[in-house]
Image (spheres, rainbow, N blue to C red):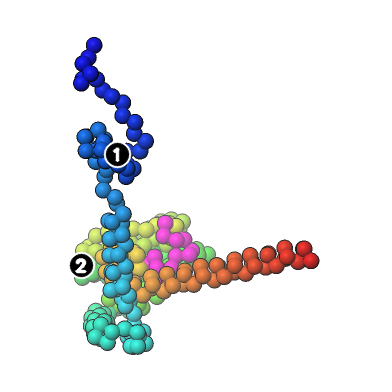
Amino acid sequence: MAAPADQRIAVPIDDPNADTEWNDILRKHGIIPEKPPSPTPMIEEAILEGRRIAHENRLEGKELDELDALEDDEDEDFLEQYRQKRIQELNKLTKKSIHGSVYPISKPDYAREVTEASNNGPVFVNLTSALGTNVESRVLSELWRQAAKEYGDIKFCEIRADKAIENYPDRNCPTILVYKNGDIVKQIVTLMTIGGVRTSMLQIDDLLVQVGGVDTKDMRVVKRRREAEDAKDDKSAARGVKNGNLRHATVDDDDDDWD
């Protein structure tokens, strides 16, 4: 029979993580492990840091006229700093904007206009459908024109798929090919994976960022994302008001039943 000192005694423990005097005694004697540190301070720190960054970047993507409209709300020196930053970005874009429209190309031009040209920067190619009934192809062609106009520093090309690749199936149209340094670095077959017929410039922006065509902080990207978020917030607010009115109307109808 083991000596009393060698016998293990079952110590009642309700919750080893609870802040009780009994648990403190048990931790002191090594019967239960030390309580792990609370994640709350780290979470609060992360939230504060996120708010700080959001506050510092609140002017990102705003146009010059939008900055001018904030003169009464923002610190003058801080606003001027952003104004000068925006002017520099605009000047830089103007110098780099050597394209501005979609290049319609033929197969003999492909190597020169696409493969070789991609050594100077990314080239985006839209392989279009030969059929006018292909809705996705028509959607992408329209987005291609808008993107080429907004991103004059990037080359956008377009060619009918069956003219570029013999017997290319129309069911694979539109197809997006992105070239960099003479190689294909991104290929998207139809718009199914990026939004289908609902594909918008937001998805084109994402594609440009993914392949390094533009930076994620590019003011054109930031502005569109901010506008989309604002529109989403407005839609949610309008839905909330509508639901509130419906609930109010329901209550009024119930009250009428008691009249």
Viewer-proximal residue among 169 and 22: 22
| Residue displayed at 36% across by 75% down | 223
| Residue displayed at 24% across by 67% down | 118
Q: Position of residue 76 (x, y in %)?
A: 27, 87
| Mark nearer the viewer, 1 or 2 | 1
Query: Could you say which quadrant of the image residue 164 lies in?
Result: bottom left
Whether residue 196 sits left or right of residue 223 in the image: it is right
Element type where label 2 sits in the image: helix
Q: Residues within 10 Å of mark 1 (few under 14, many from 20)?
A: many
Residue 137 among magenta residues: no
Task: Say which label, 1 or 2, has the lower sequence index.
Answer: 1
Q: Where is residue 101 in the image (x, y as percent from the top left)?
A: 35, 78
| Residue displayed at 27% across by 65% down | 49
Name the image quarter holding the N terminus: top left
* Residue holding disc 2: 119
* Residue holding disc 1: 23
Viewer-proximal residue among 48 and 213: 48
| Residue displayed at 59% across by 66% down | 243
Residue 25 is at least partly visible in this image: yes
Viewer-proximal residue among 128 and 10: 10
Give the residues in magenta.
193-204
Residue 91 is at least partly visible in this image: no
The answer to whether the residues at label 1 and label 2 have Cβ atoms under 8 Å apart is no
Rounded to the nearest whole Å, what is the CA distance between mark 1 and mark 2? 68 Å
Element type where label 1 sits in the image: helix
